[in-house]
Image (cartoon, rainbow, N blue to C red):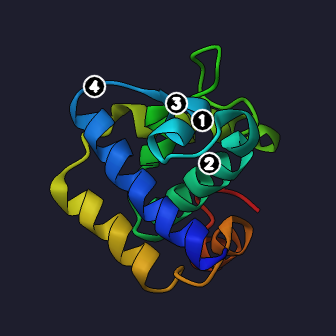
Amino acid sequence: MTKIQHTDALRALDFIIEAYKAMEAFTYQTLAIKLGRDPNINAKAVAQMCDKLDAAAAFADIPLLALRVIRNVDGEINPKAFKKRGALRDKIIARSLAHYFTEDDFLKIKEAMEGPLQDLGNRKSWALVRTITDAYGQ
């Protein structure tokens, strides 16, 4: 993940936290707009940022905040998220939807982003997470 993507992911986290507290949701496109990016060009990049933020949450052993707050254009949780994991996908989503996120949770996500995951992209971040837990499948 480039420095710009990392910086934008941290900015996205702030917007995601605000949305969570306001009980609102973003789409990848509306979050792109909040980040000052073209939603038609950058929705995929925003999705990758959100994926890395969820890897940071998993690294911190808390449910997935971005998964909970970000929706696709149909208002659904990203159907590609954990799509190959069947019942595990349902369990991950249910855990994230049921969790009450606290300021401590937000801090732990930021710490994972600024620490072990800082120089990693979303896929390498998940690879690292899977070395410490099997809660998200292989």
User: Quick one: label 1 or label 2, which is nearer the N terminus?
Assistant: 1
* Image spot of residue 38 (x, y percent): 64, 40
Question: Sequence order check: which comes first, mark 2 or mark 4?
Answer: 4
Q: Are marks 3 and 4 in contact (CB under 8 Å)?
A: no
Quick check: 21 above or below 48? Answer: above
Foreground disc of the pair 4, 1: 1
Rendered location of residue 16, percent (x, y): 38, 43
Tell me the kind of residue under disc 1.
Tyr
Task: Report the number of numbered marks.
Answer: 4
Mark 3 or mark 2: whose residue is earlier in sequence: 3
Q: Earlier in the sequence, mark 4 or mark 1?
A: 4
The residue identified by callout 4 is: 23
**Circles 3 and 1 in contact, beta carbons < 8 Å:** yes
Q: Label 2 is placed on what type of residue?
A: Val
Upstream in the sequence, badge 3 or badge 4? 4
Point 65% across, 71% down: residue: 130
Q: Secondary structure at mark 3?
A: helix
For the residue pair 5 and 119, the one nearer the viewer reads as 5
- Residues at badges 1 and 2 in contact (C-beta under 8 Å)? yes
Residue 61 visible from this viewpoint: yes
Asked where in the image residue 119 lies, by quadrant, the reply is bottom right
Circle 2 or circle 4, nearest the eye: 2
Q: Which residue, given by chain and number where applicable, does mark 2 sit on?
A: 46
The disc placed on residue 30 is: 3
Q: Is residue 21 above or below residue 120?
A: above
Taking the spot 45% from the left edge, 35% from the top edge, the residue there is: 68
Cα–Cα span, label 2 and label 4? 20 Å
> Which residue lies under the disc numbered 1?
28
From the image, which quarter does the N terminus lie in?
Answer: bottom right
- Image side of residue 67 versus residue 84, left or right: left
Query: What's the CA distance linking mark 3 and mark 2?
Result: 10 Å
